[in-house]
Image (cartoon, grey):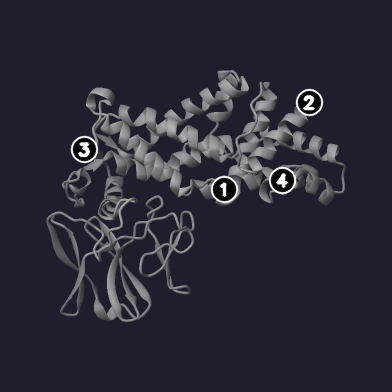
């Protein structure tokens, strides 16, 4: 049985690099990137899986050929932004103008394979700029996965104080350059 | 329920990696939610997809494409024309996937994972240069690889990380091939060490001729 994907050719550097590649190869090359891009903007697996599915269902049939892998990545990221904006608008009633401010604040280096480390580094940079209590509540909650009660105990504050601290810390963090 | 409560319920769901509650949010609240999502994603490894999800979505996309050109403008056999230097890395990555068994088959993985059309043999590294449990990097045409010596047995591996296409580096201290981009690590047989969902580094066709290791690369 013949499979399309077997018709692969390794490129020689002297040729104009044009190479036939099956769509599933594109998918495998970009699936992790799209998922992480989406995940960083919803922060949970079920939504990230649903939205990643939407991105590929929408984008793959519309890709124009030929295309450089960088163009395919850019198109997938643009589609991700649209799908994310729909998600936030539908479920959180957020207006598009406000959303664009947050979602498109993203640096354009998403295609850079090192951007994950950048994301972590920038998250840490945001945390270190916060006042001690704000930083601590976010570190305990997000980086250590503490419950609100455990966080309150670790910080020696009441449950409702911890909740208010968390709220203010997130709002303050949102006012800074976020790693999105 | 006030804003602090709503946000706390949202954060609780994120920490458990569950779907968070939906509610109308004003602009400031929404900014806090987006910040929460970004912080959650910054936890190392939190934002990596489940391999089952990646495979299931591929099957679903395949069904869409199989519905035929009338339905989607696509067919499973449709090919992309990839251009640009990055295409080489993509192609190297694919050779692997296409030659490996599909997830639902049990065919054994052969010694040669990389499918190369019209290959030719190129001498890349002297046999004597590859001492036991080390790896020596080479570039031959579009092929970036390592010649690896595992306890006296030589073979060649692609140096392109199966995660996102960075070039892995030999780590002498651990006798491993490590990716500088996201920390993936591969054993000298190409198998992933710290991320089970990754594909192994593909083996390249190799042979010893005279005192040189030769690798098959594309016909120039």
A27, B89: nearer the viewer: A27
Dividing the image into 4 quarters, which one contains the N terminus of chain B? top right
Do badges 1 and 4 share one subunit? Answer: no
Residue B64 in percent (x, y) is at: 32, 31
The residue at which mark 1 appears reads as B46
Circle 4 marks a residue in which chain? A
The residue at which mark 2 appears reads as B2
Of badges 4 and 3, the one in the foreground is: 3
Dividing the image into 4 quarters, which one contains the C terminus of chain B? bottom left
Residue at image x 35%, y 72%?
B135
Q: Is residue A48 at least partly visible in the picture?
A: yes
- Distance, label 4 to label 3, CA atoms, is 47 Å
How many C-alpha atoms fall within 10 Å of the one at disc 4: few (<14), some, or many (≥20)? many
The residue at which mark 4 appears reads as A141
Secondary structure at numbered mark 2: loop
A134, A153: nearer the viewer: A153
Do badges 1 and 3 share one subunit? Answer: yes
Circle 3 marks a residue in which chain? B
Q: Is residue A165 left or right of residue B160?
A: right
Task: Report if the CB atoms under discs 1 and 4 are less than 8 Å apart.
Answer: no
- Distance, label 4 to label 2, CA atoms, is 20 Å
Secondary structure at numbered mark 3: loop
């Amino acid at each position: 049985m013949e499979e399309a994907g077997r018709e692969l050719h390794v490129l020689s550097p002297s040729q104009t690099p044009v190479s036939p590649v099956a769509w599933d190869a594109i998918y495998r090359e970009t699936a992790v990137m799209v998922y992480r891009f989406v995940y960083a903007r919803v922060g949970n697996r079920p939504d990230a899986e649903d939205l990643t599915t939407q991105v590929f269902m929408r984008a793959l049939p519309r890709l124009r050929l030929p295309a450089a892998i960088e163009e395919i990545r850019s198109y997938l990221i643009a589609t991700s932004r649209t799908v994310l904006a729909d998600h936030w608008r539908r479920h959180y009633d957020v207006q598009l103008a406000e959303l664009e401010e947050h979602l498109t604040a993203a640096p354009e280096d998403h295609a850079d394979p090192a951007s994950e480390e950048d994301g972590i580094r920038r998250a840490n940079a945001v945390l270190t700029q916060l006042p001690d209590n704000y930083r601590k509540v976010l570190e305990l909650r997000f980086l250590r996965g503490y419950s609100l009660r455990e966080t309150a105990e670790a910080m020696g504050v009441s449950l409702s104080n911890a909740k208010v601290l968390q709220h203010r810390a997130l709002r303050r963090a949102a006012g800074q350059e976020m790693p999105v | 329920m006030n804003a602090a409560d709503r946000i706390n319920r949202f954060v609780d769901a994120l920490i458990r990696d569950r779907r968070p509650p939906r509610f109308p949010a004003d602009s400031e609240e929404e900014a806090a939610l987006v910040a929460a999502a970004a912080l959650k994603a910054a936890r190392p490894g939190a934002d990596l997809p489940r391999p089952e999800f990646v495979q299931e979505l591929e099957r679903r996309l395949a069904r869409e494409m199989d519905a035929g050109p009338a339905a989607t403008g696509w067919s499973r056999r449709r090919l992309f024309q990839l251009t640009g230097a990055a295409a080489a890395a993509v192609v190297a990555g694919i050779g692997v996937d296409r030659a490996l068994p599909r997830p639902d088959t049990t065919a054994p993985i052969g010694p040669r994972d990389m499918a190369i059309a019209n290959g030719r043999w190129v001498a890349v590294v002297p046999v004597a240069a590859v001492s036991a449990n080390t790896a020596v990097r080479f570039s031959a045409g579009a092929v970036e690889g390592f010649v690896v010596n595992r306890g006296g047995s030589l073979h060649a591996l692609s140096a392109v990380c199966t995660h996102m296409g960075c070039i892995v580096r030999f780590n002498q201290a651990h006798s491993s091939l490590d990716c500088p981009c996201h920390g993936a690590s591969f054993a000298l047989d190409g198998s992933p060490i710290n991320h089970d969902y990754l594909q192994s580094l593909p083996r390249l066709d190799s042979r010893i001729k005279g005192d040189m290791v030769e690798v098959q690369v594309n016909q120039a």
